[in-house]
Image: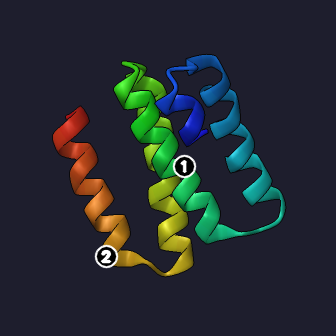
Amino acid sequence: AEEAFCNNDIESAKSLYEKAVSTAREHRFINDEALACELGGYFFLETKMKDMAMEYFMQAQQRYQDWGAVAKSNALFEFVQRALG
């Protein structure tokens, strides 16, 4: 997903972020799901899809909480408040 994004292949990147999240969720890798959601959020923010960015960031924040990474969750929340209001 990150490579596709860097290569400006937006449709492939979108699909690959979705796949990364769903695969991590399917295998119950909470930390990987959180990271995939966060990176997907940055992708959607950069590509001006703010609703999708908010959805991904909210999922990431919850998964970080579930994983016990409270400080990371809080930092992400603060970033989202500044970036998306």
51 lies left or right of 67: left
52 lies left or right of 23: left
- Residue 39 placement (x, y as % from top left): 48, 47
Quadrant of the snapshot with the C terminus: top left
- Residue 13 placement (x, y as % from top left): 61, 29
Q: Residue furthest front?
A: 7
Q: Which residue is mark 1?
A: 37
Give the residue at x 35% y 70%. 72
Question: Is label 2 in contact with label 1 (beta carbons under 8 Å)?
Answer: no
Q: Determine whether 60 is above or below 48 in the image.
A: below
Q: Determine whether 1 is above or below 66 in the image.
A: above
| Disc on the earlier residue, 2 or 1 | 1
Residue situated in front as seen by the camera: 23 or 8: 8
Q: CA distance from mark 2 to mark 1?
A: 17 Å
Q: Determine whether 34 is above or below 46 in the image.
A: below
- Residue 23 placement (x, y as % from top left): 79, 52
| Kind of residue indicated by mark 2 | Ala
Q: Mark 1, residues whose alpha carbon is within 10 Å: few (<14), some, or many (≥20)? A: many
Q: Which residue is mark 2?
A: 71
**Residue 48 placement: quadrant:** top left
- Regarding mark 1 in the picture, which secondary structure is present there? helix
80 lies left or right of 4: left
- Regarding mark 2 in the picture, which secondary structure is present there? helix
